[in-house]
Image (tube, rainbow, N blue to C red):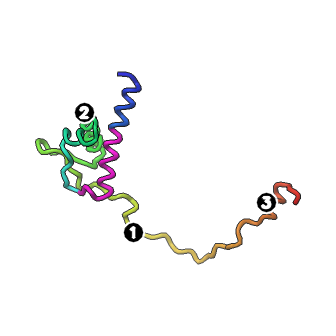
């Protein structure tokens, strides 16, 4: 196997993983949902079944999905929502300081650069 072929396989595996992550983040797949079969996923994204097996194995190792022997792969109950959807438990404190609206003083910049106007 050449390095270019190995790189192509890794990128295809990564694209399958990204597609599954995107579906979970978009709530198209939720905890305990069954993922498509290996053959079904391979056919739908146009990769070999071994690429899907690798992607599913990597996602299972990350804890995002889990395998059930003889039943398939399922979204893990511990799959976390994207951070953008999680409300902060301790919002940052509000500042009482106002930000001046005057902008950066041009004279200071010109003087520091030694530019004569």
In the rendered image, residue 22 lying in the magenta stretch gets the answer yes
Asked whether 83 or 110 is in front, the reply is 110
Main SS of the magenta segment?
helix
Q: Horizontal placement of 45 versus 87: left or right?
A: left
Callout 2 crowding tier (Cα within 10 Å): few <14, some 14–19, many ≥20:
some
Point out residue 43 in the picture as x, y percentages from the top left corner: 23, 39
Q: Quote the CA–CA distance across marks 3 and 2.
A: 60 Å
Mark 1 or mark 3, which is nearer to you?
3
Q: Which mark is residue 53?
A: none
Callout 1 crowding tier (Cα within 10 Å): few <14, some 14–19, many ≥20:
few
Point out residue 85 in the picture as x, y percentages from the top left corner: 37, 63
Q: Quote the CA–CA distance across marks 1 and 3.
A: 42 Å
For numbered disc 3, what is the local secondary structure? helix
For numbered disc 2, what is the local secondary structure? helix
Residue with the mark numbered 1: 89
- What span is in magenta? 13-30
Q: Which mark is residue 109?
A: 3
Residue sitting farthest toward the top: 1
Residue with the mark numbered 2: 50
Q: Residue at the location (11% across, 42% down)?
A: 70
The image quarter in which residue 3 lies: top left
Q: Residue at the location (78% across, 64% down)?
A: 106
For numbered disc 1, what is the local secondary structure? loop
The image quarter in which residue 82 lies: bottom left
Mark 3 or mark 2, which is nearer to you?
2
Point out residue 67 in the picture as x, y percentages from the top left corner: 19, 44
Image quadrant where one finds the N terminus: top left
Callout 3 crowding tier (Cα within 10 Å): few <14, some 14–19, many ≥20:
few
The reply to whether dot 2 and dot 1 touch (C-beta < 8 Å) is no
The numbered mark, 2 or 1, whose residue comes first in the sequence reads 2
The image quarter in which residue 37 lies: top left
């Amino acid at each position: 196997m050449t390095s270019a072929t190995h790189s192509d396989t890794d990128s295809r595996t990564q694209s399958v993983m990204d597609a599954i992550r995107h579906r979970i983040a978009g709530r198209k797949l939720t905890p305990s949902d069954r993922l498509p079969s290996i053959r079904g996923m391979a056919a739908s994204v146009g990769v070999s079944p071994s690429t899907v097996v690798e992607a599913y194995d990597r996602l299972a190792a990350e804890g995002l999905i889990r395998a059930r022997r003889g039943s398939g792969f399922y979204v893990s109950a511990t799959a976390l929502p994207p951070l953008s959807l999680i409300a902060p438990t301790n919002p940052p404190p509000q500042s009482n300081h106002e930000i001046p609206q005057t902008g950066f003083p041009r004279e200071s910049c010109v003087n520091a650069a030694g530019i004569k106007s």
